[in-house]
Amino acid sequence: MRVIFCGGMALLAGGCIQVKAPDKPIEINLNVNVKQEVVVRLQKDAQEFITENPELFPQ
């Protein structure tokens, strides 16, 4: 009896749910500056390479 009651309640509750697409498109603005991080990493890697290989870059 309990199973029938729970099943009936699930069917009744299932009719109340409505899924509808929004009227306007979803817009996500991400203002991320990746260029700065890449440049800093490249500068650090280049500086380490130069200090580890001074014979390749005479001053």
Image (cartoon, rainbow, N blue to C red):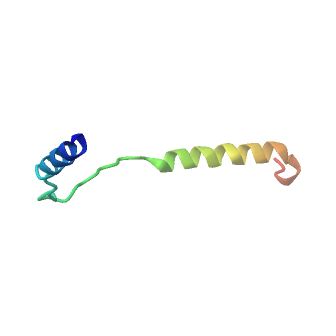
Q: Is residue 21 left or right of residue 31?
A: left
- Among the 4 quarters of the image, the one containing residue 26: bottom left
| Percent position of residue 41, x then y | 62, 45
Q: Is residue 20 left or right of residue 41?
A: left
Q: How many marks?
A: 0
The residue at the far front in this view is: 1
| Percent position of residue 6, x then y | 21, 43
| Percent position of residue 51, x then y | 80, 42
The residue at the far top in this view is: 2
Give the camera-side residue of 23 and 13. Answer: 13
Give the camera-side residue of 50 and 27. Answer: 27
Q: Is residue 13 left or right of residue 51?
A: left
**Quadrant position of the N terminus in the picture:** top left
Residue at image coords 57%, 48%: 39
Residue at image coords 56%, 49%: 38
| Percent position of residue 10, x then y | 19, 47
Residue at image coords 16%, 51%: 11
